[in-house]
Amino acid sequence: MHLLLFDIDGTLIASGGAGEKALRIALREQFAVEDDFRSIEIAGRTDSGIARRILERHQIPATEQNVSRFLEGYLAQLSLLLPQVPGRVLPGVVAMLDALRTRKDFAVGLLTGNLVRGAQLKLAHYGLWHHFPFGAFADDHHERNHLGPFAQSRAQAHHGIAFPPEKIWILGDTPHDIACARAIGARALAVATGIFSLDALEPHQPDLLLEDLSEGAALLDTLCSPSAR
């Protein structure tokens, strides 16, 4: 079996800015601080890592208590905002996930910078949560490059077999997703459906680089090929 690990924001869905807006409101409500986050890198980072960076930027101690307080406020706002903003499922995602449900040669999970609860809120809202029985999340570690082993371990527990790196694809829309794949020796599929263009992603040398996932089911046979680069 091959293991496909999907990023969420910019890869599966576009949330219409719900996540960033929820962070801004949570920061204001929990710590009385305003920030437009222009100097904070969000795409491809983990929620827990983003929270630490924002707090440190405003000289607020990034203690476990403060980070938890910030993220609880974020999740509360996210649940309110998702139905209010014009988000969408990205091209080819539904067809690809539906095709994967009929394939016995693929295991499917998440590798995302979202918290577990944030991932569930977003994907349930767009009708995708049921496709992903396991994953690795920002609750596991605040550095994305440390998430791969969590996903591998949970995939093995769920399916009863080990997944060597050469059988793993990490699908994402940022250079951080590509680096995360490299951290465990996995292959990287990058899509230009987030804020990074094809030209911006290409220098990071993903094994496959696509405009989007619109090839859907047809893409799966490509991912099985040992020569896919």
Image: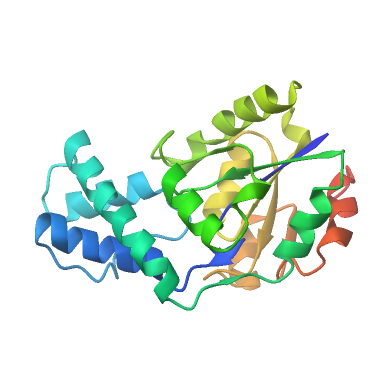
Residue 41 in view here: no
Which residue is nearer to you in this view: 218 or 208? 218
Above or below for 84 versus 96:
below
Which quarter of the image is occupied by the N terminus? top right
Q: Is 182 left, or right, of 47 in this rendering?
A: right
Q: Is 170 left, or right, of 113 in this rendering?
A: right
Q: Residue, x 78% and y 63% (percent of image)?
A: 95
Q: Position of residue 128 (x, y in %)?
A: 62, 56
Q: Residue, x 36% and y 68% (percent of image)?
A: 81
Q: Position of residue 173 (x, y in %)?
A: 59, 61
Which residue is nearer to you in this view: 27 or 75? 75
Residue 177 in view here: yes
Which residue is nearer to you in this view: 80 or 108? 80
Quadrant position of residue 134: top right
**Most distant residue in the bottom direction:** 86
Above or below for 78 versus 130:
below
Q: Is 60 left, or right, of 20 in this rendering?
A: left
Q: Position of residue 191 (x, y in %)?
A: 66, 64
Q: Residue, x 55% and y 59% (percent of image)?
A: 174
> Which colouring convention does the figure follow?
rainbow
Q: How many marks?
A: 0
Q: Is 229 left, or right, of 209 in this rendering?
A: right
Q: Residue, x 12% and y 48% (percent of image)?
A: 60
Q: Position of residue 44 (x, y in %)?
A: 48, 55
Which residue is nearer to you in this view: 71 or 209? 71
